[in-house]
């Protein structure tokens, strides 16, 4: 393993994966005073990113990085993480007391069990933000939460590393990691899809910069939703304006057919229905108005509509 960094309490850290996440977190840890002993970068993009964000850090093979590191940061795709850790463990590369830390949202520490069996310490540290792989991400880390999972004695280590990177640690139980990650993906990824769908519709009618039209509305909606949850919902569904909802549905169905974009109509129906039920459950949309909205959506035969009203 590497010699400790010059400052007391600083660690020698190796980065496996110079993708957008690994390179940025490596730069953040370096800024906190830790020594980066090596980075693994295979593609041309990864090497370019490593040169920009991690200058003078040697690009090394994975086994050499593990051998030199007190902390090994795995920033690799989810499906590669388990096999990679197992292979390194089988080859005897991990040592007692070495810290293994991954950035996957999907997994907790169980995926690092082969290393733990070799005496290593397992940490799961997932940054709740999207990355560009540019230096501007370092500033964004200052307002980001990190989903942190570790066994009790080692949780403070994970939390301290997150704080050093500028983030806010949020403890997530091992068994909750898949659902936690699903919630984040649902919010982030599907927001991008919705904006893409709305932009496609606006572009079809000649609006050249749909992002500029949607921007103020969407930003305000997101800010309000983050502050007030379902209470921020506005529009024809929560008002019970069935005629408008029916018109939206019919026009979007026509657009979907003409533009070969069936995903748009399907997404509108699914989300309008979900919005109606959520508004009904919190008492903002009365039962009778809920049924009118469902009929306007063509969902009067929905199994949910047979429940006869909002759920307590």
Image: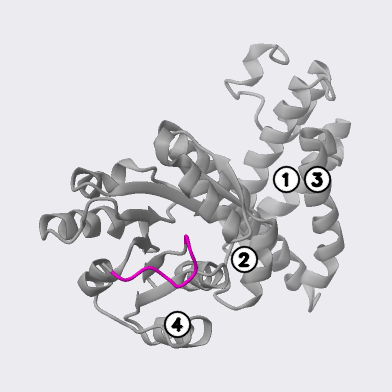
Q: Is residue 128 visible?
A: no
Q: Nearer the viewer, residue 256 or 20?
A: 20
Asked if the residues shown at circle 1 and circle 3 are in contact, with their CB atoms under 8 angstroms apart, the answer is: yes
Q: Residue at x 22, y 46 (%)?
A: 119
Q: Residues within 10 Å of mark 3 (few under 14, many from 20)?
A: few
Asked if the residues shown at circle 3 and circle 2 are in contact, with their CB atoms under 8 angstroms apart, the answer is: no
Residue 50 badge: 4
Q: Residues within 10 Å of mark 1 (few under 14, many from 20)?
A: many
State yes or no: residue 8 in magenta. yes
The magenta region covers 2-9
- What residue is disc 1 on? 249
Q: Position of residue 143 (x, y in %)?
A: 70, 57
Cα–Cα gap, marks 1 and 3: 5 Å
- What residue is disc 2 on? 259
Element type at mark 2: loop
State yes or no: residue 7 in magenta. yes
Q: Nearer the viewer, mark 4 or mark 1?
A: 4
* Dot 3 or dot 4, earlier in sequence: 4
Q: Residue at x 48, y 70 (%)?
A: 26
Q: How is the image coloured?
A: one colour
């Amino acid at each position: 393993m590497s010699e400790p960094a010059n400052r007391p309490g600083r660690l020698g850290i190796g980065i496996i994966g110079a993708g957008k996440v690994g390179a940025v977190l490596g730069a953040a840890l370096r800024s906190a005073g830790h020594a980066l002993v090596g980075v693994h970068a295979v593609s041309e993009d990864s090497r370019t990113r490593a040169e920009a964000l991690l200058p003078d850090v040697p690009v090394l093979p994975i086994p050499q990085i593990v051998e030199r590191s007190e902390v090994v940061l795995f920033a690799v795709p989810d499906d590669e993480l388990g096999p990679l850790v197992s292979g390194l463990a089988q080859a005897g590369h991990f040592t007692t007391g070495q810290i293994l830390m991954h950035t996957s949202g999907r997994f907790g520490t169980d995926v690092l069990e082969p290393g733990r069996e070799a005496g290593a310490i397992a940490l799961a540290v997932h940054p709740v933000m999207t990355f560009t792989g540019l230096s501007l991400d370092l500033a964004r880390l200052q307002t980001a939460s990190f989903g942190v999972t570790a066994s009790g004695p080692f949780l403070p280590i994970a939390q301290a590393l997150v704080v050093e990177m500028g983030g806010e640690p949020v403890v997530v139980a091992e068994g909750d990691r898949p659902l936690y990650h699903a919630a984040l993906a649902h919010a982030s990824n599907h927001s991008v899809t919705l904006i893409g769908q709305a932009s496609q519709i606006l572009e079809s009618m000649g609006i050249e910069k749909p992002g500029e039209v949607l921007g103020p509305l969407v930003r305000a909606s997101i800010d309000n939703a983050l502050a007030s949850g379902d209470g921020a919902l506005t529009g024809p569904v929560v008002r019970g304006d069935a005629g408008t909802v029916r018109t939206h549905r019919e026009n979007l169905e026509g657009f979907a057919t003409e533009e070969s974009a069936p995903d748009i109509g399907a997404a509108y129906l699914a989300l309008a229905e979900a919005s109606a039920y959520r508004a009904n459950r919190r008492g903002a949309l009365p039962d009778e108005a809920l049924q009118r909205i469902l009929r306007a959506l063509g969902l009067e035969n929905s199994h949910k509509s047979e429940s006869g009203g909002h759920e307590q």
